[in-house]
Amino acid sequence: MASASRPAPSAPASYEIALEELEQLVARLESGDMPLDQLLVGYQRGAELLKFCRDRLEAVETQIKVLDQGVLKSWTPE
């Protein structure tokens, strides 16, 4: 399989970079212009990016809970 020889994509440098890559990837997947083999690779990369983003959000939420003595408070813009 040709995709097996490709190097694994690196982890994103930040949440924002991962989110931007994910948005671009979703747009390409939704366009319907990708060949079938690239669709699978794109889907797999999207799943990795989604997991990265979710993990980062959970880590930040945990840090906020620690800062707020274990209580996650609702955020309201001032």
Image: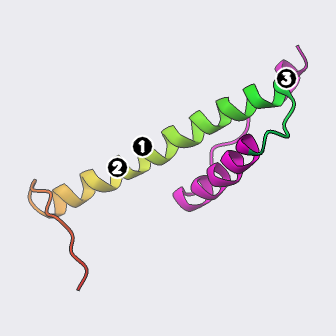
Q: Which residue is mark 3?
A: 3
* Picture layout, residue 2 above or below residue 12: above
Q: Pick whichever of labels 3 and 2 is earlier in the sequence.
A: 3
Instruction: Name the residue furthest top.
Output: 1
Q: Pick whichever of labels 3 and 1 is earlier in the sequence.
A: 3
* Picture layout, residue 58 above or below residue 35: below
* Picture layout, residue 45 above or below residue 56: above
Question: Is residue 50 rendered to the left or right of residue 67?
Answer: right
Q: Can you give x and y, in whole percent of width and height, for residue 26 in the image?
A: 66, 46
The reply to whether callout 2 and callout 1 are in contact (CB within 8 Å) is yes
Question: Any magenta on residue 77?
Answer: no
Q: Which residues are magenta?
A: 1-30
SS at mark 3?
Answer: helix
* Picture layout, residue 47 above or below residue 69: above
Mark 1 residue type? Asp
Mark 2 residue type? Ala
- Residue at 15%, 57% (x, y): give it: 72
